């Protein structure tokens, strides 16, 4: 788009927002400081490098077979470099343990060490990205029973405990080497397809396993531990050991981050509403922003009401400094670069909309019980010239505007992705 036209449109929108007491320059400066943690697994359909022929487990499913998926770490990093060129701001990468580079040798997950991620660490240093981490407690023979650290089998429990302990050490190395705390998030698939006769024992095992995992203290400047719940999954429709209530209680007692995944709750539940309920008591939260269509389908994030509500609540509640924002979806039915970029850009657009809100004015009307004026202003904000501010943010960050995005993606698809057999 014409740069001069974008600049003129921005000046007009800046003046219009100023009439509401909103400083668009300040909003842009704030947005530029907010990092998103992009999920590496969008680029290869959660395959990883451990065993390219292994079936995806843990009740997870990827839809679609669009050509061009990354087949190794170099291709995945190449794709990520392209994605970061399409997203304004400076952002992080969220790695799963199955993306270790082991030189073609089989290294069991409980034996993974920081050196198996040296390629990722070197890449992150060279490009100024922070790294986050996840133990991979699925797609493995010792997870086929549907249970890991809550298993009735002591040997299986210990294997996964050791894997998660190893993951914490890897995350701490990331934090130390990059001078930026790494979030280490624990999600397990443990649960039953049908109604269990004993819910208690598995949860007691889960508690004991977590206690053992967290025995070693890590400076929060290096690693931040997080626990993630889920309502149900394929194969755990009737009972999930790591429920929201379980992990909320554990995080409260042990001062851990609580992961709130927008696809891991009942469709009528509001993750946005949960933030002000848990933030007074927790050191912080990890957000996995996704889009569930009727269930945890992990669709690409769009700028819908639910996503906007979460991001608006982060700004209104002044939670940005204690909220770690990540993406979590995987879609192979469309171009994977587009899936990454469109989802991430929508989260940033939602944050910008929230930062452009005259929150103090809305709250003042609410305290005056002037609900008519509050509603009127809320609705008026929906037609404010937000798009001109977003285009300006893209321009000053040297990334494509929304209408330019698809052409850049198509060029990369023609020149790079189409060459992969």
Image (cartoon, grey):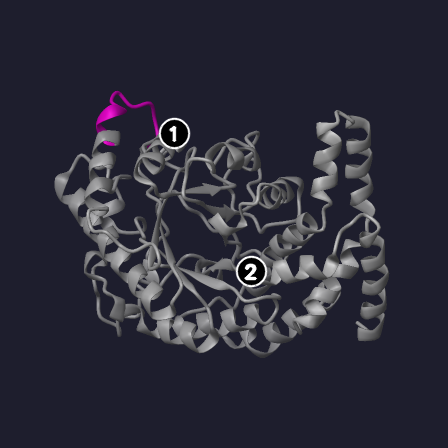
Is 8 included in the stretch rendered in magenta? no
Instruction: In this rendered view, identify the residue nearer to me: 8 or 75.
Output: 8
Give the answer, above or below, for where 323 lies relative to 147.
below
Q: Over which residues does the magenta segment extend?
A: 192-202
* Magenta segment main secondary structure: loop
Side of 398 where 205 appears, left or right: left
- Disc 1 element: helix
Instruction: In this rendered view, identify the residue nearer to me: 282 or 114.
Output: 282
The residue that mark 1 highlights is: 245
Relative image position of residue 2 (x, y in whole percent): 82, 74
Q: How many marks?
A: 2
Which residue is found at the position 63% from the left and 43% from the top? 312
The residue that mark 2 highlights is: 340
Which residue is found at the position 37% from the left and 51% from the top? 56
Residue that protrudes farthest toward the top in the picture: 197
Give the answer, above or below, for where 346 lies relative to 227.
below
Relative image position of residue 379 (x, y in whole percent): 80, 38
Q: Nearer the viewer, mark 1 or mark 2?
A: 1
User: Residue 53, can we see it?
Assistant: no
- Disc 2 element: helix
Which residue is found at the position 51% from the left and 40% from the top? 263
Side of 140 where 369 appears, left or right: right
Relative image position of residue 338 (x, y in whole percent): 60, 62
Label 1 and label 2: CA atoms lie apart by: 31 Å
Along the polypeptide, which appears first: circle 1 or circle 2? Answer: 1
Q: Where is residue 107, by image quadrant?
A: bottom left
Relative image position of residue 305 (x, y in whole percent): 66, 40
């Amino acid at each position: 788009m014409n740069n001069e036209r974008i600049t003129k449109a921005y000046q007009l929108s800046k003046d219009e927002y100023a009439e509401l007491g909103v400083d668009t320059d300040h909003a842009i400066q704030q947005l530029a400081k907010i990092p998103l943690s992009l999920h590496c697994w969008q680029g290869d359909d959660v395959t990883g490098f451990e065993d390219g022929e292994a079936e995806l487990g843990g009740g997870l499913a990827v839809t679609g077979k669009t050509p061009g998926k990354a087949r190794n770490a170099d291709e995945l990093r190449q794709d990520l470099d392209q994605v970061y060129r399409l997203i304004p701001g400076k952002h992080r990468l969220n790695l799963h343990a199955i993306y270790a580079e082991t030189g073609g040798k089989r290294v069991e997950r409980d034996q993974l060490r920081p050196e198996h991620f040296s390629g990722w660490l070197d890449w992150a240093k060279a490009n100024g990205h922070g790294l986050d981490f996840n133990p991979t407690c699925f797609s493995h023979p010792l997870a086929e029973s549907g249970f890991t650290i809550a298993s009735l089998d002591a040997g299986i429990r210990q294997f996964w405990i050791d894997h998660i302990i190893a993951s914490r050490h890897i995350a701490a190395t990331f934090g130390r080497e990059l001078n930026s705390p790494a979030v280490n998030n624990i999600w397990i698939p443990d649960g039953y397809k049908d109604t269990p006769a004993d819910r208690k024992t598995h949860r007691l095992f889960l508690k004991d396993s977590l206690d053992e995992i967290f025995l070693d203290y890590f400076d929060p400047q290096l690693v931040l531990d997080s626990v993630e719940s889920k309502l149900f999954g394929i194969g755990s429709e009737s009972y999930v050991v790591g429920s929201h209530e379980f992990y909320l209680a554990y995080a409260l007692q042990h001062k851990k981050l609580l992961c709130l995944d927008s696809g891991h709750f009942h469709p009528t539940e509001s993750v946005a509403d949960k933030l002000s309920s848990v933030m007074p008591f927790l050191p912080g939260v990890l957000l996995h922003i996704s889009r569930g269509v009727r269930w945890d389908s992990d669709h690409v994030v769009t700028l819908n009401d639910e996503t906007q509500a979460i991001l608006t609540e982060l700004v209104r509640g002044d939670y940005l400094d204690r909220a770690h924002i990540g993406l979590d979806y995987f879609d192979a039915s469309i171009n994977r670069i587009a899936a990454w970029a469109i989802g991430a850009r929508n989260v940033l657009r939602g944050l910008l909309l929230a930062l452009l809100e005259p929150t103090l004015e809305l709250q003042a009307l609410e305290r005056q019980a002037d609900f008519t004026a509050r509603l009127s202003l809320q609705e008026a904000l929906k037609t404010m010239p937000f798009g001109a501010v977003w285009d300006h943010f893209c321009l000053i960050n040297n990334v494509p505007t929304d209408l330019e995005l698809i052409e850049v993606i198509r060029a990369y698809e023609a020149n790079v992705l189409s060459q992969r057999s």
